[in-house]
Image (spheres, rainbow, N blue to C red):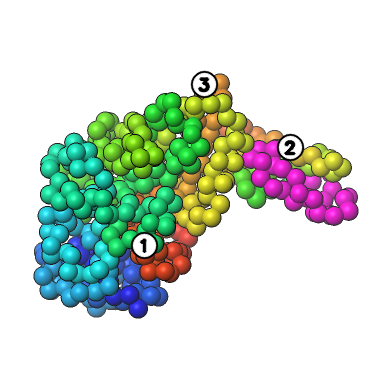
Amino acid sequence: MIRANVVGGSGYTGGELLRLLLSHPDVAIQGTSSESLAGKPVGRAHPNLRGVTELKFRPLADLEPADIAFVCLPHGTASVRWDELLGLAPQLIDLSADFRLRDAAVYEKYYKREHPRPPLLEQFVYGLAELHRDSIRSAKWVACGGCNATASILGLYPLARAGLMDTHAPIVEVKAGSSEAGRQASVTSHHPERSGSVRAFAPTGHRHTAEIAQALGNGTPMPVHLSVTSVEMVRGAVATSHVFPSRAVSERDVWGIYREAFRNEPFMRLVKESRGAYRYPDPKLLAGTNFCDVGFDLDVDNGRLVVISAIDNLMKGAAGQAVQCMNLMNGLDETTGLSFPGLHPS
Amino acid sequence: MIAVPTLTACPVCDGDVTISEDTVANELLDCGECASELEVLSLEPPKLAEAPEAAEDWGE
């Protein structure tokens, strides 16, 4: 059995990790930390886990070493408390933004602070198996991709590899659910303010822009335009990407590009149907799953290819991605513990 | 009827569609890749077309 620590287990991504790991056949949870809920049962923060586990939160300092540690601390914390984390396990998967970018200057530009440990950046592998499967298998440290970045990258990487985005930067509009903002309440998440709102919270300058550019570029960041809007949804992120192909393509060409890219990907599904209520990807169907659904439509007259990619932000965009990486790092089938197919209707 | 199962390309997505030995002309098949409903226009040679559907207007 793999012994796992979940650091910062009281947040939403920590709760999802606990849910997944509690039913994972090859994992035993050694401990989980929360400073604010130390001594309290896990069900206090995650009521869906009542009666499922007797685990209690502990202070970080009380966690015992394990085989792997999942770090779900707020952005900017793991890189500062690195020395405390290092002793928790030889394998470490960080779900924050601290180690996703390889260039400290880019980190400073987007996160408005100097990176406290620049030499570590090159030692982390970015956690999207669809792009870095072999590197993840041999990695000791992995940085999971951000949720909006994950939805965007997974929809676009087949086109980038096919050279269709060489001349024009894609325009990506992400609609995001409220759980992306985390468990901490704020004025903007207050129900009378949030309910019914369609809030353009990052028309430009979203932090995930740098991740997408890094992941889609081949060594050099690929220019990308990103806007993010929060909508009336708890879980889910859907990226609508407008691509202006650098050469003429037919719909069948695009089918072929995606079919080839996703052929052996267990969590990538091509969704483009001419009938039914769900003709294109919809995050409503993906709640609790590790799938990323991708569909497209081609506007031949105007040379525009629209790609729709959807995920559960807490799963493929965070905890599910992390478990997929853990499976790869430990020689397991990467789908282990991630087979939930979702609910319909939901 | 055709003698043996035959593979042909979906006219929508170019995926493989199997025409089985008991398929008849004008039968409707589903593409396993894109879920398009396809009409068998002819068996020899195998020829498929996307079956028409009543259009929806979601722009109101």
**Residue for badge 1:** A138
- The local secondary structure at tag 1 comes to loop
In the rendered image, residue A20 lying in the magenta stretch gets the answer: no
Q: Is residue B14 left or right of residue A195?
A: right
**Mark 2 and mark 1: Cα distance apart in space:** 48 Å
Q: Which residues are magenta?
A: B1-28
Residue A104 screen position, x and y as percent = 19, 43
| Residue toward you, A100 or A146 | A100
Is label 1 on the same chain as label 3? yes
**Mark 1 and mark 3: Cα distance apart in space:** 44 Å
Q: Nearer the viewer, mark 2 or mark 1?
A: 1
Label 2: chain letter: B
**Residue for badge 2:** B49
Identified at 19% across, 51% down, the residue is A119
Residue type at mark 1?
A: Ser
Q: Quadrant of the C terminus of chain A?
A: bottom left
**Residue for badge 3:** A302
Q: Nearer the viewer, mark 2 or mark 3?
A: 3
| Residue toward you, A89 or A228 | A89
Q: Quadrant of residue B48?
A: top right
Residue A212 screen position, x and y as percent = 34, 40
| Position of A171 relative to A51 (above/below) | above
Q: Quadrant of the N terminus of chain A?
A: bottom left
